[in-house]
Amino acid sequence: MVDVIVKNPDECSAEELELFRSFLLCRPDINIQNLEKRIAGAGKLAFAFSEGKPAGISALKRAKKGFRRRLLEAQDPVVFTGLPPVELGWLYVDESFRGQGVGSSLVSALCNEKPRLPVFSLTTADNTSMRRILHSNSFSYHTDIFMPGRNSYCLYFRKGDGDQSIP
């Protein structure tokens, strides 16, 4: 059984914020520059627990304009000209809990939190688990993204009905 808690960052205790940060630091691709500030600026943080033990995290966050611009420039072929301002990202599941529905529970909880919100998400092309999770949560594949010096990514969108706020 997976329990997921979704909170605004300002509702989180110092221990919860440290737990979120520690999970992010397990990801080899995470940019640590201003990480605490970026966590505090996220719209929603999700924490998963399995049998009371921390199992994973994810977030809805406002993607910076520079990042969104780089994504638009890196698509191949050019398929779209704009991105929703909100990204579903920072998904990380502890290795001992993988394959138990933790990632799916996190994404579902965040999507249910703001069902009207248009959202994008990136995943590496070889991450079939994440691609399945996104598909099962009404995200659709749009294009490949090739960022110089990084992995190739798949870009997914979930359409909302216009609400773009993440209080």
Image: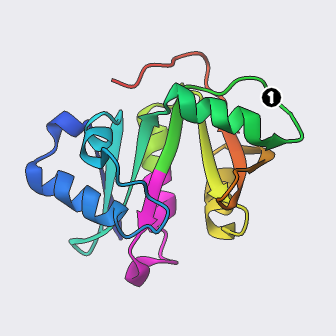
Disc 1: which residue: 80
Q: Quadrant of residue 167?
A: top left
Please report the bounds of the magenta region as a residue range: 90-107
Query: Going by the image, does 58 lie left or right of 85?
Result: left
Q: Nearer the viewer, residue 116 or 120?
A: 120
Q: Position of residue 29 (x, y in %)?
A: 50, 62
Q: Nearer the viewer, residue 30 or 104?
A: 30
Query: Going by the image, does 160 lie left or right of 73?
Result: left
Q: Which image quarter holds the N terminus? A: bottom left
**Residue 17 drawn in magenta:** no
For the question of whether residue 147 can be seen, the reply is yes
Question: What is the basis of the colouring in this image?
Answer: rainbow
Q: Position of residue 23 (x, y in %)?
A: 32, 65
In the displayed structure, would residue 65 be above or below residue 111? above
**Rendered residue at 41%/36% (across/down):** 113
**Rendered residue at 79%/41% (across/down):** 75
Q: Quadrant of residue 19?
A: bottom left
In the displayed structure, would residue 55 be above or below residue 86? below
Q: Nearer the viewer, residue 132 or 144?
A: 144
**Rendered residue at 16%/44% (across/down):** 12
The total number of labels drawn is 1
